[in-house]
Structures are given as C-alpha cells and as structure tokens.
Image (cartoon, rainbow, N blue to C red):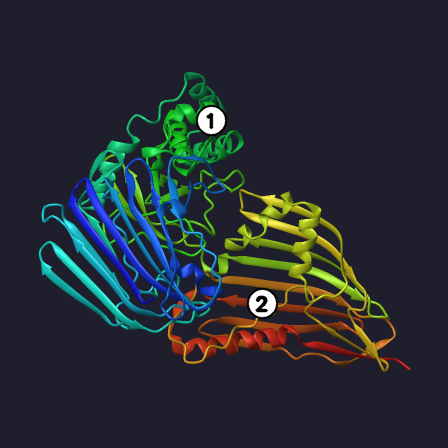
Amino acid sequence: MRLDQIDILISSQRNMNVKNKRVVTVLNEKGQEAINAYEHYNKKTTVENIQATVFDAFGNEIKKIKRKDFRDQCATDGGTVFSDSRYIFLDYTPTQYPFTIIYESEIETSTTAFIPQWFPLNDYQLSVEKSILNVSYPDNLGFKKMEFNFANFKINKTVDSSTKLSYIATNIPALKQEDYSPAYSVLPKVMMCLELFHLEGVDGTAKSWKEYGQWYSDKFLTGTTELPEETKIKIKNLVGDEKDPIKKAAIVYKYLQEKSRYVSIQVGIGGWKPMLANDVDRLGYGDCKALSNYTRALLNAVDVPSYVTLLYGDRDKHDIQSDFVSMQGNHMILSIPNGDNYVFLECTSQDNPFGYQANFTDDRTVLVVKPDGGEIVRTKNYENKGNAQSSKGNYSLVENGDFSGNIEIVSQGSQYSQKYRLETTQPTEREKHYKEYWDNINNLKINKTTFSNDKDKISFTENTAISAVNYGIVSNNKMIFVVNAFNQTSGVIKRIRNRKNPFEIQRGSYDTDEIAVALPTGFTIESLPTTFELNTKFGEYKTEIIQKDNNNLIYKRSIFIKKGIYKNTEYDEFRLFMEQISRNDNAKIILTKKQ
C-alpha cells in the first residue's frame, strides 16, 4: 500500500462526502484483494466518481479504467432475496506482476449514522507506506472518536481546530497472521460517530445508550407489533393456563420455529426497521429484525415482556463497544427478562433449543432496546466445563488386528452446537463427518448411527457402531495399536517464532472418555502406557488404563481446556501442552502372540 487516503467532509447532519485515493503495488496474485476497488450505493448514497489507472513495474501507464468499465450489481448475498442496495466494483485481471493501481472514488450520502472507520493497516501480509485520514465536521453535531491499538505503530495525529482532525500512519511493515490471535483486537483503527446523525430519512440522537435505545424504539419499533386477532387467539390457546413467563415464551418460540423461516429483505429503511409483524405472520418469513420483532409481538399477546437486542453475530466473539455510543452491530435477537438476567432467543433458527446461544451470540456485550432506553448487558457465557463431551464405549480386536466397536457420545454447551445438526444430514455427509472425526482409523466403516436430541437439557447423543480392518498392526508375532481409538487430539499447534500478539482460547471445553477394550485371544500384554497427567494454566489432562484381567482393559481419559487470553510469551508453553496431549493420545499397546 503506497498510499491509502480517506477525506471525510461532514457538512451537516444530513450530508457527508467521502473521497478515497488508494495506490497499491500488487506483487503477486495474493495481493489482488488489497486493491479494494468498490463502493456501495443506494437511493440515499450516490457514487459521484470512480476510476482507476494501472501502471507496469516501471511506472508506465497500461490502462485507464473509467466508471463504465466497472461492474455494477445488486448487493445481495445468499440470504437476501431482495435489496435496493447496489455496489460498483473493479474486476481487473492483470496480464503481468508486479503492477501498480491508482484507485479513486467519491461518494455523497445523506446517511451520517455510519462514518467510515479508519484502518491504517487493514489486513495481514500487507505493508503500508502511508495511510491518511482527514475529517472535517461541524462543531454542533457532537463528533466523537475512539482509537484502538496505536501503541506499536507509527501514527501521528493532528487536530487543526475543533472541527478538523488528521491522522498519518507511515512505514508499517507487513504483519503475519498468528494463530489464536484475539478476535477483532490486534490491528489499529479509529471509530467515529456523531451524537446527532441521520439515517434513511430519520434524524437520530445518541448521546448515551439510554437515549440511543429510546430513539431506536420510538423511530423503528413503534407500531410494528400489530397481529391479526386469529393469531392472538391461536397463541393464547397454545399457551393455555401456563402462568410462568419463561415457559410461555418456550411455547411461543416453538410456534415461531415451526411457522417461519429466515430470509433477508433490505430495502431503504427496512435495512434497520423491522417488517410489520402482520406481514411476517402472513408471509411466514423475515430477516433477523423481522423475526425478532414478530416473536416480540407474539409474546405481547400472552403478556410476556421482551425487547429486541442489537449485537454482533459471529462465531468469533465480538462486543458492542460499550464505551462508544454509536450505531453498532450486524444482527438482532430477542431478550426476555428473567429475574435479574435475560433469556436470549435466536429467532432466525428453526432448530435451536429455546434460549440456546452458542456459538454465534454467546458471551458478548449487546444492546437491549427498551421503550424507555437502551441497556448494555452481556449474553450467556458457556463456562469451560459446561462445554462437555462425554464418551462411553467399547471396542474389541481379533487376531488379525481387525477392529469393531460401539460408542455413545453426549455433547453439551458449546459442543452441542457442533453436533446437533448431524441428525438432519444426508447419509453421505454423515459418513464424511465421521471419517474426518476418526481420521486416525484407517479403513473405517460406519455400520450404524442413531441420534437423540434432548432440547430441554440441550444435550445431543450419538450412538455409533464402527469397524475397521487392520487397526492393530501384526508383525513378528506382535500386535501394536493405539489405545485411544475414539477421541484423539491430533491437531498440531503451529510454531511461531518471536510471536507478537497475545493469544486467546475463546471457548473452553471438557472431554471425558471411558472405553472398554477387549484384547484378542492368543496374545499376552507386553507393554501398556503408564498413567499420564498434566496440570497447567491452560488446562488439565489425564489418562489411565485399568487392567481388569488378561484380556480386558478400561481406558480412561479426560481433557480440560480453559478459555482465556494469554501473553505472547506463554504461547510456546501452550504449544508444548497441546503437543504432550497429542503425543500421549497416540500411546500404543504392544501385545505378544502366545507360542
């Protein structure tokens, strides 16, 4: 990145102009993404200018690319069935590397609710010679900014007056992405917002979360929860004499899941304002806002209070920045008061258990939108040992090393979400899953699988019968096999020399295994792995083998991984911990054939 310059001019609450100039030298095909030559637009945002010029390695101009040469298409994704948002983008295929491209654009918008964030370094494997941000704004709109992760970078800030702000970042070497780096918290950035802003024809105010929540409730939610009388009667009949609000909510949630499905329709203010509950009731579909609001309407009909809740939905935990009041989030769920806490509902899911959140909306700060204002709260944290997998089973070996076994695996907490959809997969997908899960067993054959999904206890049980030829290796009157057949930790933790970032284990877990092993007749035990135990700040691990008689063993194993953020200097210690587990999971039994 030779130059990445953003000039933002906010001339009023209802007008913002953003100019971009980006000069990028692309060294090989992996650098194509760094060009980022695209702009979004809609009825409230226009692209005033967009162009690019391409130069060869010696600085000779190869091509000028004008607006008509850019591609222009509807900004829909797999879940969006209709949108009035479009984007225009450069689709350039180079004839040679390296090349340099100068990209320039200008947009004009009445939406000032979202001021572009500044990322002086916006990706890994990308070096930056110069990145510039210039912002001009009126002094009466409550302009605010927040800086993140500046400490290790060359970034200078200039405040020309009370209405002008500039940042210049220079000579930032490319960074390598480091495994286990904390999500969303490593690269430098600046967030900006206005306390008085405009969104799709609606003026807004956000001096506090309470004020923001009240504005959102008044402008976007008022008048959206009317339902047909027949639907109200149906819901009341379903609930019957139940008095407990949480039990009533569970009945309503089941009704929602059976009746509706998720689609996204983003048109004008509909990107922020929910579809009317009446329309969702009639059509049977909606996006996250529509379905959350529809569930709110259904709960209203049976006198259960609930509140729409804004957050970042992502497998990586991503907080609403609670000390920076602004429009944030990419997803909506529903909150139901339950004593001093809340039960949170994912209204877009047709198969989630009631109140279940892992691994998309769990353990993060969110904004609960109440009629009298917003409230920042934290969603459910699935604790380390609650994310459990318990395995009980058996296997036997015969004289030639062939293997047959049965295993029952019970998954709970965040591990439940990784398993419960197995019951709806096609047989070929299911077989693929198990062959990947038990990739330590060659020639694996899945003989039978049955499932039990207890949504009340949020517990998923797999019962599987498997077999394999030559699991035990027979040679020179000996048989060698790995005792831990069903739950090996084989993932290698990558060595990272001179690690820069701290590392994070986002979710803890707790696995316990108890496996009965029947040895082949005609063999005696020559060597058994000894009891092995580890206890570190990252977790605990223990294995033991109990010999019941000459032909029957019990293999016991437990592995506990603790969530947490750890220092970069502790990474090698963590890697060693995981390597010791992996090595011990591969411990072998040696048998000798009787003569």
Compared to residue 401, the image places residue 146 above or below, namely above
Q: Position of residue 18 (x, y in %)?
A: 24, 50
Which residue occupies the foreground of this view, 379 or 193? 193
- Is there any visible trace of residue 240 in the rendered image? no
Which residue occupies the foreground of this view, 454 or 111? 111
Which residue lies at the image location 70% right of the left edge and 53% below the top edge? 431
Q: Position of residue 383 (x, y in %)?
A: 45, 58
- Residue 592, quarter of picture: bottom right
Compared to residue 162, the image places residue 302 above or below, namely above
**How many angstroms separate mark 1 from mark 2 (CA)?**
43 Å
Helix, strand or loop under label 2: strand
Quick one: label 1 or label 2, which is nearer the N terminus? 1
Q: From the viewer's perspective, is 90 left or right of 518? A: left
The furthest residue to the right = 595
Give the amino acid type for the residue marked by disc 2 in the picture.
Ser
Question: Crowdedness of circle 2 by 10 Å Cα count: few (<14), some, many (20+)?
Answer: some
Which residue occupies the foreground of this view, 74 or 447? 74
In the rendered image, which quarter contains the C terminus? Answer: bottom right
Q: Position of residue 445 (x, y in %)?
A: 77, 57
Question: Crowdedness of circle 1 by 10 Å Cα count: few (<14), some, many (20+)?
Answer: some
Q: Which mark is residue 558?
A: 2
- Tag count: 2
Give the amino acid type for the residue marked by disc 1 in the picture.
Val
Q: Tell me the residue that label 1 is attached to.
A: 239
Q: From the viewer's perspective, is 265 left or right of 513? A: left
Which residue lies at the image location 47% right of the left edge and 21% below the top edge? 234
